[in-house]
Amino acid sequence: MKRVTFKFNPALWLNNKSLRACSPAARGFWADLLCLCFPSGHLTVNGHPVSDDQLARMIGEPVKSVREWIKELGEAGIYSD
């Protein structure tokens, strides 16, 4: 069986000051998103971007938390639209 992986550099993760300034919950959410987006680089369901509700179900957290973490990560410049 072929393993499918992606490179992860712990030093970059730990030394990104913007990311480190985010809450542990937001950082964990970001790690989940990185995994969910692998290998295509984006997250869709039936060819459409996932909604906040769908994403909340995928990670098993309340939609309110998901929206807070998306906002927190965006304000920290961790991702761009």
Image (spheres, rainbow, N blue to C red):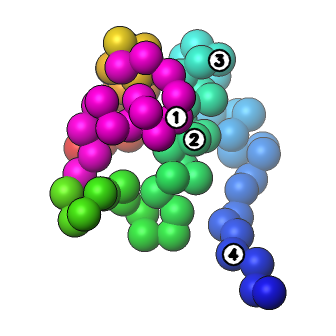
Q: Which residues are magenta?
A: 49-63
Instruction: Residue at 36%, 59% (x, y): give it.
Output: 42
Give the distance between the C-alpha atoms of the residues marked 3 and 4, in whole angstroms.
27 Å
Frontmost residue, 57 versus 13: 57
Give the distance between the C-alpha atoms of the residues marked 1 and 4, in whole angstroms.
21 Å
Instruction: Sort mark 2 into few (<14), some (14-19) or many (20+) by Cα contacts within 10 Å.
Output: few
Mark number displayed over residue 77: none
Q: Majority secondary structure of the magenta segment?
A: helix
To which residue does mark 1 refer? 59
- Badge 3 or badge 4: first in the primary sequence: 4
Residue 50, position as x, y percentages in the image: 28, 46
Find out whether residue 57 is within the magenta segment.
yes
Does the residue at mark 2 contact the one at mark 1 (Cβ under 8 Å)? yes
Q: Viewed as shown, does residue 1 lie left or right of 25?
A: right
To which residue does mark 3 refer? 24
Residue 43, position as x, y percentages in the image: 36, 55
Q: Amino acid at mark 1?
A: Ile
- Badge 2 or badge 4: first in the primary sequence: 4
Find out whether residue 59 is within the magenta segment.
yes
Label 2 sits on a secondary structure element that is helix
- Indicate the quadrant containing the N terminus: top left, top right, bottom left or bottom right: bottom right
Label 3 sits on a secondary structure element that is helix
Give the distance between the C-alpha atoms of the residues marked 1 and 3, in whole angstroms.
15 Å
Give the distance between the C-alpha atoms of the residues marked 2 and 1, in whole angstroms.
7 Å
Label 1 sits on a secondary structure element that is helix
To which residue does mark 4 refer? 4
| Rendered position, 63 above or below 81 | above
Frontmost residue, 76 versus 64: 64
Q: Amino acid at mark 3?
A: Pro
| Rendered position, 63 above or below 58 | above
Frontmost residue, 36 versus 6: 36
To which residue does mark 2 refer? 32
